Image: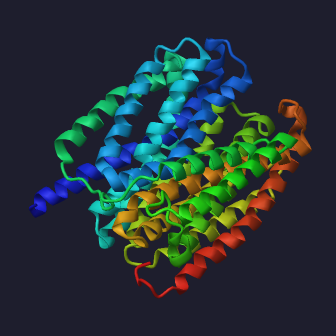
Amino acid sequence: MSAHSDRDYKNSLLLVASFAAFLNPFLSSSVNLALPAIGHDLNTGTVALGWVATSFILTSAIFLLPMGRLADISGRIKIFKTGIFLFTLSSFFIIFCNDITSLIILRILQGLSGAMFFSTSLALISSAFPPGERGKAIGINITSVYLGLSAGPVVGGFFTRHFGWRSIFITLIPLGIISLILIYKKLKTDWADAKNEKFDLKGSLLYGISLALFIYGFSKLSGTTGWILMLCGLITGFLFFFSEKHTTHPVFDFGLFANNRIFTLSSLAALIHYAATAATGFFMSLYLQYIHGLNSNIAGLIMISQPLSMMALSPIAGKLSDKIKPGILASFGMGMTAVGLSSLCFISLHTSLPIIIFILIIMGIGFAFFSSPNSNAIMSSVEKKHFGIASGVVGTMRVIGQSFSMGITMMILTFYIGKQPVSQLQSEGLLHGMKTAFIIFSFLCIPGILASLARNKTKDNKNI
């Protein structure tokens, strides 16, 4: 392959991988905004509407790791393009949904397809880009994630208001088709570095059941059912662990954690970072609308300051991680996140909007300098045959961290407000709950910073 064709291949791969990275956060954030319109159109209640979002997240979490492993065995491009195809197809059929059950079923299919391309996008980039170029490429890829988070509420809100909620899915169809054409025309080379190994179906089933029970149980911790589900999830998790220890080709090689300090600590840091930050957007949306009395459009414009700063700085942070130890940059990012969270502990009923925007920008800087370098550290710490698994682990840490963050949030709000709907009448309870949560999240950053710093002591690889 000539230098020009090699560069063309890399650019094409980065383009389709970045598009895939854009899809999940864009769709999740825009669909969340469209839930009231979906409920009104399909005449359904809040519990069923909650499953429109939850079914997608849970399915993605269950299949991220198995799909990453399957990609290592059967080919990363193969799994990636199958995921894009199924995602585009399900978006098409959602247009014709007239009841909530069919919508939830198709959202489950979207969760599966999303796991197929989300778990392989980082693996593909790591396969195509050598260590000296990988950080910059990962930074661009992660920028697409933040672009999706930024565009989702704005674009989704516009389309829902003027063309109905189905228009969100209509816009994805031509983009998916273009992406598939580009894959078939440009991406001829595939990677299957574990092609002679077998897929562990038993381990995948145990893993999926364990994760589903644990995540769903954590979201229900306010009642006894939640604790029972979490206990069942832990028991199934132990069965999964023992099954993997006695399997020749496990879906997840626990040796990656036992023998790879960088992989273990970077994954732990990612889990903690997402657990500490995922609920920020939820709290700020309530704070700006119920306490400051802003409408959803103005609140969205203020909140967009955080993902915009992430989007602007992620490529820079990623490029720097090719030259400076990613652990150092990620530790700095986690520290900035802690500063932002600590500042949010002091907001009041009268905190000015410029101060809020400034704090959100600080958190955006922290997220940018953590996420790209940390992902680079994870992907650079494993052998090529484990790229799919490592990519799946990055996604899994994100989903589990987000679930923990929202679980903590729901428990705190239940204590301060109860189960009554949030309104301006509960502004003081909401504010006390926010401050309590941000104090917990700030302290949660401490072990995250320590984990991020600890990996810098390794001498395994000077670039990691």
Please report the residue visible at 67 percent of the width from the left and 25 percent of the height from the top.
Answer: 49
Instruction: Please say whether residue 279 is visible from this viewpoint.
Output: no
**In-image side of 253 versus 236 (left or right):** left
State which quadrant residue 344 falls in: bottom right
Q: Position of residue 291 (x, y in %)?
A: 80, 39
State which quadrant residue 42 falls in: top right
Q: Position of residue 315 (x, y in %)?
A: 40, 61
**In-image side of 124 versus 307 (left or right):** left
Please report the residue visible at 63 percent of the width from the left and 35 percent of the height from the top.
Answer: 54
Q: Would you place residue 165 above or below residue 120 in this image?
A: above
* Quarter the C terminus occupies: bottom left
State which quadrant residue 59 falls in: top right
The image's colouring method is rainbow
Q: Position of residue 453 (x, y in %)?
A: 59, 79
**In-image side of 359 versus 436 (left or right):** left
Q: Position of residue 293 (x, y in %)?
A: 76, 34
Q: Would you place residue 55 above or below residue 227 in this image?
A: above
Instruction: Give the number of marks.
Output: 0
Work out whether residue 351 or residue 272 is closer to the camera in this orientation and state it.
272
Please report the residue visible at 47 percent of the width from the left and 64 percent of the height from the top.
Answer: 375
Q: Would you place residue 345 above or below residue 29 in this image?
A: below
Please report the residue visible at 41 percent of the width from the left and 83 percent of the height from the top.
Answer: 461
Instruction: Please say whether residue 199 is visible from this viewpoint.
Output: yes
Instruction: Name, please, the residue furthest toward the left.
Output: 2
Q: Would you place residue 334 above or below residue 301 in this image?
A: below
* Quarter the N terminus occupies: bottom left
